[in-house]
Image (tube, rainbow, N blue to C red):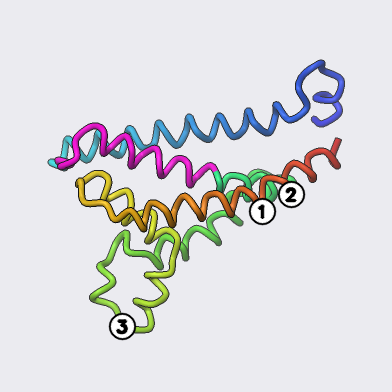
Amino acid sequence: MFDRFRSVPIWQPAPIFGALLGDVFRYSLAATMVITLGLIMGFRPQAGVLGVVAAVALVIVFAISLSWMWIIVGMLVKSPESVMTSSFLLLFPLTMGSNIFVDPRTMPGWLQVVVNANPVTKLANASRGLMHGNVAMGDIVWVLAATVVVTAVFAPIAMRMYHRER
């Protein structure tokens, strides 16, 4: 595949950025489906359309930063199934160890500490706050800072690996 990309007169990072753009499309489609289903089921965000759009944008920006990690995994493993399995192994504990499904106040003290330090908890708090109009700016800043750090660490590694593959 890389030989084919090398022989075509394209901008060399285009396949990587094309994959990221495809991810953005999938994330946007998934968010639209979830929000639509929520509205059908009775969800009424107090911050209106702008709050929902801001929340979805924040989630997508954070997800793009995580996509750089999956690009690295995709270049290291042999099959797409391996990428899915390895991503599940990381995302499952991050998701289950967050406040998405259970209020942390109902958890033991030690688990509350873990849940409150989880980046998915910060993202969930920020997106919920944006949708309901009571966002804590600290959560948004934390998510954006984490996004910058994750991208700054993993994007150069992914691009270096991609250029080495060619």
Q: Which quarter of the picture shows residue 7?
A: top right
Residue 78 in sight from this viewpoint:
no
Helix, strand or loop for disc 3? loop
Q: Residue at x 38, y 59 (%)?
A: 122
Residue 54 in sight from this viewpoint:
yes
Q: CA distance from mark 3 to mark 1?
A: 33 Å
The part of the chain drawn in magenta is 44-64
Question: Main structural element of the magenta stretch: helix, strand or loop?
Answer: helix
Determine contact: label 3, label 1, CB under 8 Å: no
Q: Residue at x 26, y 38 (%)?
A: 51
Question: Where residue 128 sits in the image (x, y, percent)?
Answer: 27, 50
**Three-letter code, disc 3:** Pro
The residue where tag 2 is placed is: 157
Question: Where residue 92 sits in the image (x, y, percent)?
Answer: 47, 61
Q: Residue at x 23, y 32 (%)?
A: 49
As for residue 105 lying within the magenta part, the answer is no
Q: Residue at x 45, y 60 (%)?
A: 119
As for residue 49 lying within the magenta part, the answer is yes
Determine contact: label 2, label 1, CB under 8 Å: yes
Question: Where residue 79 sits in the image (x, y, percent)?
Answer: 70, 45
The residue where tag 1 is placed is: 153
Quarter of the figure that contains the N terminus: top right
